[in-house]
Structure formats: C-alpha cells, structure tokens
Amino acid sequence: MERITEEQFVRLNRFVRARIADAASAEGETRPAVAALGIAAQRQWAAVHFHRTSSSAQRAETELHATASWNLLVAFADVWRDHPDFPAEAAVETFEFDSETPLSPP
C-alpha cells in the first residue's frame, strides 16, 4: 500500500465517485444498483483511508483489508476504462494475491 501515492489515491477515488454520481440519475431498477455501488465504493475508500491514516502498529493489522479494498476500487474504475479521464497511473498499482492462500499476508 505504501507504493500508492496520495495523489493516486485521491484521483482514483474522485474518478470512481464522479462516475457513480453521473449514474445516480438512473431510474427504475437501476437506481438501487447505483446506490449499492456508491455505498460499496465509499466503504472501500474508507478502508484504504483508515489504513493510510493509522499508526504504524495498526497498519500491520489493516494491510490486507486495505489492499483488497484498493483492488476493488481499481476494479470499479476499470468499468470506465474507456473514459477520457480514466486515471491509468493510479489504477496500475494493483496487487497480486497468492492463489493458494489468498487471505494470508504475503
């Protein structure tokens, strides 16, 4: 998570939230899905933000959750990969998990 700069974090978050806000004008059955996507994105942002602002002792405990949350934010952004404002330099900072033990720290 330390490889991700504050600027990358902010740009990716703004990009995702702006796209979700654009979709908020949806009607019918699409509206609840857009609301759920907004809630999910906000929670992922909060997990990464909590990790980044935690004490060094807490960071060891929150690293895995923050990494998974960052990856999900990148996945949300990837939906709009063709958008001209897509923050490619931020989205490139994703992380690989060990497929044998994905919940274990590296």
Image: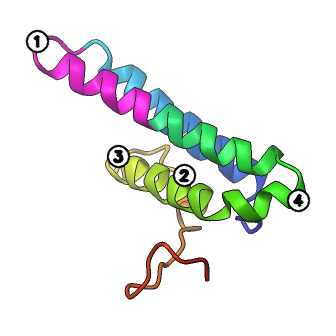
CA separation in Å, label 3 and label 1: 22 Å
The residue where tag 3 is placed is 80
Tell me the tag on residue 28.
Answer: 1
**Camera-side mark, 3 or 1:** 1
Q: Which residues are magenta?
A: 26-40
CA separation in Å, label 2 and label 4: 28 Å
Query: Principal SS element in the magenta part?
Result: helix
**Camera-side mark, 2 or 4:** 4
Point out residue 45 in the picture as x, y percentages from the top left corner: 58, 40
Element at label 1: loop
Residues tagged 3 and 1 counted as in contact (Cβ below 8 A): no
Identified at 39% across, 47% down, the residue is 76
| Mark earlier in primary sequence (3, 2) | 3
Q: Is residue 30 magenta?
A: yes
CA separation in Å, label 3 and label 2: 10 Å
Residues tagged 2 and 1 counted as in contact (Cβ below 8 A): no
The residue where tag 4 is placed is 56
Identified at 32% across, 16% down, the residue is 24
| Quarter that holds the C terminus | bottom right
Identified at 53% across, 60% down, the residue is 91
CA separation in Å, label 2 and label 1: 30 Å
When asked about the image quadrant of residue 35, the answer is top left
| Mark earlier in primary sequence (2, 1) | 1
Horizontal side of 65 relative to 2 (left or right) equals: left
Circle 1 packing at 10 Å, graded few (<14), some (14-19), many (20+), is few
The residue where tag 2 is placed is 87
Q: Is residue 38 magenta?
A: yes
Point out residue 90 in the picture as x, y percentages from the top left corner: 60, 58
Element at label 4: helix
